[in-house]
Image (spheres, grey):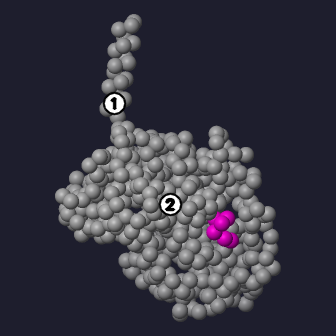
Amino acid sequence: MTIRIKHFFFLFLCIALSMPTIAQDINITPLPKQVKKLQGEYVLPHNLVIGVNKAGKEGRREAERFCNELKAATDLGVTLGKNKQAQIRLEKSKKISNPEGYTLHIDANGIDITAATEVGFFYAFRSLLKLMPEGVALGVRKTGMSYKLPCTDVADEPRFHYRGFMLDVSRHFFTTKDIKKLLNLMALYKMNYFHWHLTDDQGWRVEIKKYPKLTTVGATRHNSWNTDLRTGSYWTNQTYGPYFYTQDEIRDVVEYAAGLHITVIPEIEMPGHFAAAVTAYPEFSCDPAGKHGVWVDGGISTDVLNVADPKAVQFAKDILEELIPLFPAPVFHIGGDETPTTAWKANELCKQVYEKEQMSDFSQLQSRFTREIAGFLRSKGKRIAVWNEAITAKGAATDMIKETGATVFCWNPCQKGAEMAADLGLNCIITNWGGDGCYYINRRANQADFGAGRGGDNLRKMYDYWPVPATVSADKQTYYAGVQATFWCEHVSNMEHLEHLALPRLMGVAEAGWTPQEDKNFDGFVARMKKDVPMLREAGYRYHPQYIDYEGAEAK
C-alpha cells in the first residue's frame, strides 16, 4: 500500500511539473496564456536602449510608440538601437502563429520580446508597462525612482479574436475626450473592439450632412432622466441637447482608436429604436401625420421605420452611405433588436408587402429589411452585425438572416441566440445581459448602487460566467467569435458614474476574452485588480470598491 501511494505521488508530481506554470501573482491582466515567475528583478537603466534591428518595420513602429510613452511618463532616457547594445531586444518571429501573440522574457540580462505582427509587439509592450510602477502604464509621470521589473517568462495569445466594449451614447452623451479615456484603458487590458452605439429612440448622435434635421431635431429632447451616483434618480426638467459628434470628431476618434489597435464598430439602430430619426423626418415613419417625439425615458418605442416604403429604405441607405467612409471596420452594426410590429400591422404599404410575399408573421418584414441592408453594405465592402432578435424574435425569417452572413451579438436569450447562430453558420459575440452571468456592466453591482438592475450583477457573478458552455460541440465552438462588455446609459450621465459601475468588470470581460477558461481564477483576478487600484486612482479613473477595495469577502 505504501509503495502504491509513493508511486501515485511521484506520478502526480511529474504531471504537475509538466504543466505550464500560471503565475497569478505576476501583475499582468488579462492573465497570459503561459506565465512563469523567475527569480530576481531587473532594473531598467537610466539610459535605456531598445534594439529594433531584428524587429522589422512592425516592431520598430511599436518600439517608437513605447519609447515615446516612457519618455512622457518617466525620466528615463530612451533611444532605439541595435540588439547587441540594447537592454530591451525585439525580434520578429514567424514562430508566433497567432497574429496577436507574443513572448516576453525578463531576466538579469534584460528583456527579450518576440512577435510576428505590429499588434503582437503592441500587446507585449502593454504587458511590460503593466509590470512597471503604478501609474506609468496609463501615462502618469513618475520621476526619481527605480523602475524594477519582476523576472518572468511569458508566452501569450488571446482566446478569442473579438474582445469588445459597447457604449451607448444616445441615452446620455459622452465627449470625444471621455471616449479616448476609455479607449486608453481598453488598450491596456488588450481589448480590441469599441462598439459605438450612436443612435436610439432617445437621441441621434452623429452628423449626417444629407439629413441635417437628424442633429438639429433628433439630437435634442425636452427632458432627461438622470441617476446620481450618490442620491439616485431624478428628472432634470431641462432640454437635453443638441448633443452629437461631427464627422470630423468621428474621424478623430476612429484614428485614435486605430493607433491603439482598437477597431471602432458603429451601430446605427434600424428599423426599430428609430424614434429620434422619424421625429426629424416623419415622412419615413408608418404614420407621417401622427405624433412623433424624441424619447426622454427608457423602454421600446413603436415609432419605427416604414420598411415597406422604398423611400424610407433609401433614407436608411443614404445614412449608411455617408457613414461608411468614416469607419474602416469591416463590420457595420444595424441593431435590429426590440422592434415592435404594431405600426407595420396598421400601415397599408406594409400590409401589401406582407400579403404579396405570403409572410406568416409581420416580424418577417424586419428580416426582409435586414437582408436588403446587408446586401447594400456588402456592395460597399462591409459585413452586417445584428442583435440576436434578428434570429430569436418570434416569427423571424432565419433563412433570410442566414443569407446575410451576419455576426450576431447575443444578449437575451444569450446562449440560445448563440446556439441558433452557430446552427445557421453565423459568428456570434457573447454579451449576456444578466441572470447567470452579466456582461451588461451598467447594471448595479449591489444594493448600495443606483441605476439599472436589482443590485446582484456583481464582479464575481460576471467573472465566473462561461461564455462558451462546456456542452457546445467542438465544431460549433468555432462560431463563438468573442465576448463583449456592454454599457447602456439610461441611468448613467457622467464619467464618474460610468467608471464606478464599469470598472473593474470591464477588465473581467477582457480576461474572459483573452485567458483560457481553465486558467481563470477569481481570487487571482481580484488580487491583481487590487494591485491596479493605485494606478487607476493616479490616472483619474473611478472604480467599484466591491471586492477590490476591501479585505476579505464581498463588501455589503
Return the residue nearer the eye: 263 or 425: 263
- Say whether residue 103 is magenta: no
Q: In the figure, is residue 468 to the left or right of 98? A: right
Indicate the quadrant where residue 498 lies: bottom right
Amino acid marked by disc 1: Leu
Label 1, label 2: how far apart the Cα atoms are: 36 Å
Q: Can you give x and y, in whole percent of width and height, for residue 211 in the image?
A: 57, 92
Residue at x 56%, y 46% (from the top left corner): 526
Return the residue nearer the eye: 300 or 20: 20
Return the residue nearer the eye: 35 or 537: 537
Q: Which residue lies furthest to the top in this view?
A: 1
Amino acid marked by disc 2: Gly
Q: In the figure, is residue 172 to the left or right of 259? A: right
- Mark 1: secondary structure: helix
Q: What stretch is highlighted in magenta?
A: 493-498
Residues at circles 1 and 2 in contact by the CB criterion of under 8 Å: no
Which residue has dot 2 on it?
135
Return the residue nearer the eye: 78 or 481: 78
- Mark 2: secondary structure: loop
| Above or below, 523 relative to 346 | above
> How many badges with numbers are in the image?
2
What is the chief secondary structure element of the magenta stretch? helix
Q: Tell me which numbered mark, 1 or 2, is placed earlier along the sequence.
A: 1
Which residue has dot 1 on it?
17
Give the crowd class for mark 2: few <14, some 14-19, many >=20 residues within 10 Å. Answer: many
